[in-house]
Amino acid sequence: MSLPPLDSLPTPAVTTATPSPAPAPGDASCVTRSGSATRLTFLTRPARLVLALLPLLVIGTWAALDRSAWRDGAGRLADADPRWLLAGILFTLLGWVVAACIRQGALPERLPPGLLLASQLAAGAANLVLPSSIGAHAVTLRFLQGRGIPLARATASLALYSLVKPVARIPVLIFFLLALEDTRGLGRLTPDRTTLLSAAGTVALALTAACLLLAVVRPLRRPALDFLRTALTDVRILHTRPGRVLALWGGSAAAPVLQGSVIASVGFSLGLPLSWAQVVFALLLASTAAGAVPAPGGIGPVDAALVFTMVALGAPTGLSTATVIAYRVLTVWIPLIPGTLILSALVHRKVL
């Protein structure tokens, strides 16, 4: 028996461990990633703790600086009729629910009702820190992104919310203007020609500046077009759903009526000699005239315009001022503590 030649025998496969290439001296990507992850994990908890406590610090500072206003308002509320104050609290609660309905109506996706309402309470507290509703929009934007809504769609929802509210206010304003029996004092509220020309010039200048900015800065064109495309698509989808239309437009029309009802309830508790329709009309007119002025929560310009409007309708100046101060205490200072605590809790639980 002859042995096969050595060349025909199968050579056993020798497995040799291939050492992994050592990282280059200048390449420490793995170490950097692990170190960065460790640092981010270490810094996440303190950062969230700071963000959770920051609203309380801001509100405490503001309360210390504006203590005379809330003390005066609290004193006024102590002498008011408690039944009308209870009605004002009820209208305030309904206003928060309506605000949540408007937010839902401006978005095709369904949001959890409980968290949506909590986010609006937190947005109300944040709205008192930054002007022009920036704080409320920032909280809502963060909430929507936490629910998985893309940035373009969430931003389009905020833009639709901000556009529909003043548009829906116009027919409500006309309705209450027609409902007024005595319109003799409205002549003082009519803006003169200079004011109208200044307002029109400001709007035209803002639109021109926006168009020039898009024309000159090319990197802004694509995001602007994507935003416009998303917004138009969402508007078309939303207006094919009757529930969304009712929540968006009906809620936007009901919101100022509920807010005016709160002011009327507070005014009636103090003896304000105006009807409910007059108070709601005064709020609609004041918020339309001074709502564009950048102030935290509209406090300041809207308050002054509201006092001026109620005085023009026949209310005493002192009583009108007391009504507005007490209204701010009822709708701002009393809900401020729970709203701030909810904001801190949502940040701590990573909802925002």
Image (cartoon, grey):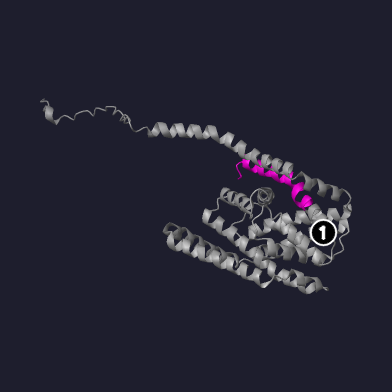
Q: Which residue is mark 1?
A: 320
User: Relative to residue 147, is residue 319 drawn left or right?
Assistant: right
**Disc 1 element:** helix
Q: Residue, x 16% and y 29% (percent of image)? A: 9
Q: Quadrant of residue 160?
A: bottom right
Residue 320 seen in this snapshot: yes
As for residue 349 lying within the magenta part, the answer is: yes
Task: Tell me which segment is drawn in magenta.
Answer: 328-352
Q: Nearer the viewer, residue 346 or 302?
A: 302
Location of residue 222 in the rendering, given as x and y in whole percent from the top left corner: 44, 59
User: In the figure, 279 relative to 34: above or below?
Assistant: below
Location of residue 250 in the rendering, given as x and y in whole percent from the top left corner: 69, 65
User: Relative to residue 28, is residue 299 drawn left or right?
Assistant: right
Location of residue 343 in the rendering, given as x and y in whole percent from the top left corner: 66, 44
Q: Quadrant of residue 341?
A: top right
Label 1: how many residues lie within 10 Å, few (<14), some (14-19) or many (20+)?
many
Q: Nearer the viewer, residue 141 or 73?
A: 73
For the image shown, how many numbered marks are present on the structure? 1
Amino acid type for the residue under numbered disc 1: Ser
Residue 258 seen in this snapshot: no
User: In the figure, 289 relative to 148: above or below?
Assistant: below
Q: Quadrant of residue 83?
A: bottom right
